[in-house]
Amino acid sequence: MNVLDLFSGIGGFSLGLERAGMRTVAFCEIDAYCRRVLAKHWPNVPCYDDIRTLTAERLAADGISVDLICGGFPCQDISNAGKRAGIGGARSGLWSEYARLIGEIRPRYVIVENVAALLGRGLERVLGDLAALGFDAEWHCIPASAIGAPQQRDRLWIMGHAVDDAGSPERWGRVLISRSALASANDFWKGAAEPPFHGVAYGIPYGSYRLRSIGNAVVPQIPEIIGRAILQAEMRAA
């Protein structure tokens, strides 16, 4: 299953989905430091630099076909730590570009991530846009601690599937986290406690960039679980 990774950051989404058995065919990331990280770990995957100029036509011209689009659009206007302008704010308003690409590309699946505060500051807009584009969706708040990470990091995860492709709701089913999947993910963290960060990592090259990039990244184990559930749903329907 070919993945277009939007707002890619340092590639946490793609790392998880590739562990599940999917393949990233393109990134889109505006931050120059993050693009260097992506180029190091995915040297053969093209990376576009601005979602506002990326189009389905451009991807097709580059020979890129997409089955699934994923991405966590900017949270600055939604987060409780920000000014709470909501999904219409200057940064979080880039959701409209995400929705535009979904409409142009018509993937079979969509995975959206954002802070849990999206529940009250724009979830109805996201779900409404997905419905207007012909996608059914389910959503869950899943903190990093749910898979055993030593931090809360509560995030909202939205999974959409094209209704005309997936057919009846029974085919899609409930794809998300089972107890066995959580237990398996918990094994990753055993004996690997994460130290707290205090201030800037002085003496580490690009230390502030690294900390910021890690802070913006998704925990890869969660998209891995979602990706496996999607592929299992595909197998059940085959």
Image (cartoon, grey):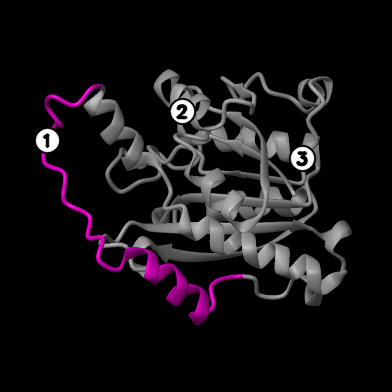
Question: In x, y percent, where is residue 110?
Answer: 67, 50
Instruction: Report which residue position mark 2 lands on.
Output: 90
Q: Earlier in the sequence, mark 2 or mark 1?
A: 2
Seen from this angle, which residue lies furthest bottom?
A: 179
Question: In x, y percent, where is residue 69?
Answer: 67, 44
Q: Tell me if residue 168 can be seen.
A: no
- The secondary structure type at the circle numbered 1 is loop
Q: Quadrant of the C terminus?
A: bottom right
Disc 3 to disc 1, C-alpha distance: 40 Å
Q: Is residue 76 left or right of residue 136?
A: left
Under mark 2, the amino acid is Ala
Q: Tell me if residue 46 can be seen.
A: yes
Q: Earlier in the sequence, mark 3 or mark 2?
A: 3
Disc 3 to disc 2, C-alpha distance: 28 Å
Under mark 1, the amino acid is Gly
What span is in magenta? Answer: 176-205
- The secondary structure type at the circle numbered 2 is loop
Q: Is residue 100 left or right of residue 9?
A: right
- The secondary structure type at the circle numbered 3 is loop
Instruction: Report which residue position mark 3 lands on.
Output: 66
Q: Nearer the viewer, mark 2 or mark 1?
A: 1
* Rendered residue at 40%/21% (across/down): 33
Q: Is residue 182 magenta?
A: yes
Instruction: Report which residue position mark 1 lands on.
Output: 199
Under mark 3, the amino acid is Val
